[in-house]
Amino acid sequence: MPQPTDIPSFAASQLTLLDAELQAELTETNALLSSHTPAALSRAGLAILNLNVSSIRTGLGGKTVVELGLDSAVVAKGDKPDIPEHGIRVGDIVAVQDQPSGSAKKTEKRELVKKGAEGVVLRVRRENVEIVLDKEDADVPGGSKLWIVKLANDVTYKRMNQTMNRLQKFSDQEYTPFMRVLFGQASPTPLPSDLNDPTNPLHKLEWNDPSLNDSQKEAIRFALASREISLIHGPPGTGKTHTLIELILQLLKQKLRLLVCGPSNISVDNIVERLASHKVPMVRLGHPARLLPSVLNHSLDVLTRTSEAAALVQDVRKEMDDKQNSIRKTRNAKERRQIYTELKGLRQEYREREKGCVNNLVTGSKVVLATLHGAGGFHLKGQEFDVVIVDEASQALEAQCWVPLLWVKANKLVLAGDHLQLPPTIKSLNSKESKAAKKDAKKSKDGSIKPGEGEKNTTEASAKPVKGMTLETTLFDRLLALHGPSIKRMLTTQYRMHEKIMRFPSDELYESKLIAAEAVKDRLLKDLPYDVTDTEDTREPLVFWDTQGGDFPEKTEDDAVTKGSKGMSLGDSKSNEAEAALVKMHVNNLIEAGVKAEDIAVVTPYNAQLALLAGMLKEAYPGIELGSVDGFQGREKEAVIVSTVRSNPEHEVGFLGEKRRLNVAMTRPKRHLCVIGDSDTISKGSKFLKSWMEFLEEHADLRYPNLADVYVDEQNV
Ligand SMILES: Nc1ncnc2c1ncn2[C@@H]1O[C@H](COP(=O)(O)OP(=O)(O)OP(=O)(O)O)[C@@H](O)[C@H]1O
């Protein structure tokens, strides 16, 4: 078993790695901002031009919210003042400032922030955008023409950084027995020896959902019985979230208080929605603008406005809003100063009243839900929970998981995830800039993460970094490596794939333990609940078009195509034109048989191939979904075509060689998986790829395309 981890060294390594990651992100954004004009940034969706302030109000936490609309001077008479298409989304970090003149070329981030105010996008509507300003005393630019421009998002890094800094400074006495288990300095408390015995009370649980399968029930019993940690391993389609819901209901029956988190808002909302159908009273933290509309009545912000205690808070809010707006009308500097002073007092009052109200709501709640990041907000500091549950844990950076673990008091953790699918996307892994950034990380240049106020980053002084640690290693991975498989239970019945589609990932990655549920194991496209003709494609769950022979060569695209895209190769991207034509032929055959375009997805690991496919397919079949493998994680479709792209005499497979990426690619379909690739190139890539090719040759409906047919077909479509 691996050595116990030294906690300060662990935190120090995390700090260095996080800094390098942030540097990589800043470098990418700053390169974009500094080399383009405002008009070009706007065209690229990164900026909105020609705005002015339409109102200012006070939001949760007493923060200033600025609403910006299009300057009427740029709206043609009779037209609606709709903001042109842009890519700015809720949660983005933006600078609000006077718009530089059209000729201004370079817009350095430093310059942007110095001149304007920085804030977070709160709401995006057709006719306006709302920004919550970071600083209370930020000067909202008074010019008649403003713009907002997207900056690198360092908020999540700041919180992870504060968390790791705190962890690093814990003294030996502060380590709880629970923390010691998380670092392998103590072993988890052994499970009751009679856990598998039918006489154990856990075998007499009353299930809320009687349809739970045995592996789900076992995972729940295991998580209930574990004292410190339990991992629920949910391979694709095995009902991981389904299981967590039952676990939450069982824990609540035991009168325990729970904090439930996930890495993204959607992962948390998914749980809120499902718990709501069981009428569980709960509070969802996080800004309402970022939540699904269906979960809003559980949002803390909304409850703070609608509960009885809320009236008191509203009174002060109204007074503050009036004052904010009067500042804009006042030209006299002395009067402005006077109003600012009054506002300061009101803000204080507002905070106290709001805190009281929020505290009552949060403290009185048996289930609190938040993103991992959101669990580090002031509402939860020091609150006691019996269990912290994290869904999609293998998609979260470890430092992110420590946000709830360090800022609330808890002694038990349940993680649900699948470490055999893709980990969180890391930018600093391969890029040249990031290597340089790692070197520079300790220098803490402008924009880099700075330790929390009054704190000093003691990375260099106190601890040696942990050897071999990368950000890609998640808490789920690390705990599994530390304590072995006895801390996890795997869900084994999957409710997505035809048995034949499931076979290879099950055998190669999940110890042959996956079972296809009765309802899905022999479902075919021809059985879809609408009219689909029985053809050689629609009656076949697994097709392999083997393009070996050199007629389908890959091409290296220039790097511009790949820039800025998430989850794609960081270097040059690859495409394969003949393979794309073959994809089109196969799609066409499925559509002709009656399969709806909306039920088909094409996934590929390469961005350049995605661009090529989009050009060839989007117009003909608007409903079809095209995606990168990374972007398709967590999704499913009736029919999925995987375009593997790589075909070269050197047998290079690049990042197609990553098992977890292929696992995601091949486990998205329900009824039909079509793999297109050059078995000659791919099988030489790795042992895993070799067995995949052998499996497909033996078990798939094997086809060898004829280039002439592919292109004839291409012309006919
Ligand atoms: N015991 C069960 N009986 C019948 N259907 C089930 C059962 N458990 C889960 N399912 C179904 O399986 C599907 C997947 O469930 P869920 O969304 O909870 O999966 P997940 O494992 O969280 O998803 P993913 O595979 O994307 O990680 C859902 O349609 C769910 O209704």
Image (cartoon, rainbow, N blue to C red):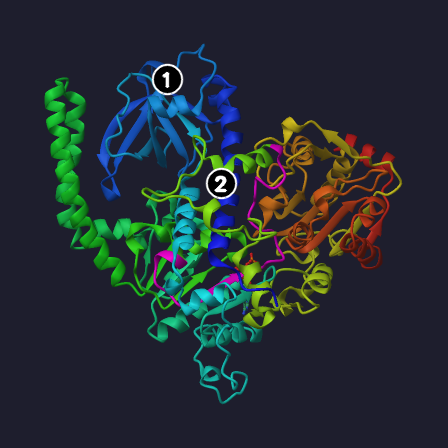
Closer to the camera, 156 or 9?
Answer: 9
- Say few, some or many: other residues with alpha carbon within 10 Å of mark 2 (under 14 / 14 to 19 / 20 or more): many
**Residue for badge 2:** 19
Closer to the camera, 459 or 184?
Answer: 459
**Residue 613 drawn at (x, y percent):** 68, 35
Q: Residue at x 69, y 67 (%)?
A: 511
Q: Indicate if the residue with disc 1 has its beta carbon within 8 Å of ligand 1.
A: no
Residue 700 shows in this picture: no
Q: Which mark is residue 99?
A: 1
In the rendered image, residue 354 lying in the magenta stretch gets the answer no
Residue 70: name its quadrant. top left
- In this rendering, which labeled residue sits more in front, label 2 or label 1? 2
**Residue 393 drawn at (x, y percent):** 51, 57
**Residue 426 drawn at (x, y percent):** 56, 43
Which of the image's four quarters has the N terminus?
A: bottom right
Image: magenta residue range? 405-432
